[in-house]
Image (cartoon, rainbow, N blue to C red):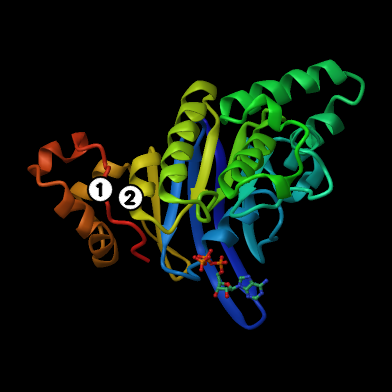
Amino acid sequence: MSKAIEFKQIKKVYGEKTVIEGFDLTVERGEFVTVIGSSGCGKTTVLKMVNGLVIPDGGSIFVEGRDISEMDMISLRRNIGYAIQGSVLFPHMTVEENISYVPDLLNKKDKERTKKAVEKWMGIVGLEEDMRERYPSELSGGQQQRVGIARALAASPDILLMDEPFGAVDEITRGQLQTELRQIYEKTGITVMFVTHDISEALKLGTKVLVMDRGKIEQYAAPEDLLKAPSTEFVSRLVEKERRVCTLPDEQLADCGHSGAAGHLL
Ligand SMILES: Nc1ncnc2c1ncn2[C@@H]1O[C@H](COP(=O)(O)OP(=O)(O)OP(=O)(O)O)[C@@H](O)[C@H]1O
């Protein structure tokens, strides 16, 4: 596997407060990394540093092998999809216009190609054809979230950053969106970094889980390893409920499907 994202000795200071220091992380290409940790521990900051929305105060970040401080932000972001919680759609644009916004910038002349991309992604995220002409205010929260995901994916980025993208939807929609996202990931082989507060979601979706506390990495491991061998007290407490939901012996934990009902633990 080659490296998609690499953080080397990253430091971030807000005002007087150092929120991240000595942060090293490698995300291999094709990995689905879920990021979980206590509130305010720096998850969003880490994510936003990948697409240059937050600039580190020390260290280097490499995306697909290139130091992002030497790249122009437009070409960096072109290759990185970004979806966040709630509706961040352009309210004055239809569903179609929202999804085609970035592809339109990229294939200015090829309207047909953009139209096909919109059609394809609406289908994949489960949006009905007749929603094309609607405005965000005419959609439910779950539908708006789907448009947000389609928009993040429509330019076919190699990397997808998601910050609690399912935080504002009901449990059923959330389950559907999780399944759809996992299928998109399996079909496209995209590299994903996904921030969540929900340990069940982190274990269910991730091929690797990054557990953070106060700007530091507590553990970075496959879900089954987190359950089998939590490396700190913090991780142990985090996965405790999941382990109780799974009443299998340790060696079979990997097969339990990580589908416990722990909900929001943090
Ligand atoms: N622009 C900013 N200015 C000052 N402090 C900030 C800024 N952005 C974040 N912080 C602080 O940095 C710390 C890390 O914030 P961040 O949003 O990365 O945490 P998080 O783990 O994503 O939090 P949560 O889980 O609550 O969303 C917090 O203490 C936060 O208050």
Q: Quadrant location of ligand 1? A: bottom right
Observer-nearest residue: 192 or 199? Answer: 199
Residue 111 placement: quadrant: top right
Q: What label does residue 119 carry, if any?
A: none
Q: How many labels does the image show?
A: 2
In the rendering, at what x and y percent does residue 148 appear? 65, 42
In the image, 64: left or right of 199? Answer: right
Q: What label does residue 260 carry, if any?
A: 1
Rounded to the nearest whole Å, what is the CA distance between mark 2 and mark 1? 6 Å
In the displayed structure, would residue 207 be above or below residue 6?
above
In the image, 114: left or right of 125? Answer: right
In the rendering, at what x and y percent does residue 173 appear? 47, 43
- Crowd tier of the residue under label 2, counting other residues whose Cα lies within 10 Å: few below 14, some 14–19, many 20 or above: many
- The residue that appears at 79% across and 47% down in the rendered structure is 73
Residue 248 placement: quadrant: top left
As drawn, the residue found furthest toward the bottom would be: 16
Please, what secondary structure does the residue beneath circle 2 have?
helix
Q: In the image, what residue type sits under mark 1?
A: Gly
Observer-nearest residue: 180 or 79? Answer: 180
In the rendering, at what x and y percent does residue 145 appear? 60, 45
In the displayed structure, would residue 265 be above or below residue 251?
below
In the displayed structure, would residue 118 be above or below residue 3?
above
In the displayed structure, would residue 58 be above or below residue 161?
below
Please, what secondary structure does the residue beneath circle 1 have?
loop
- The residue that appears at 21% across and 58% down in the rendered structure is 241
Q: Name the residue under label 2.
A: 200
Q: Are marks 2 and 1 in contact (CB under 8 Å)?
A: yes
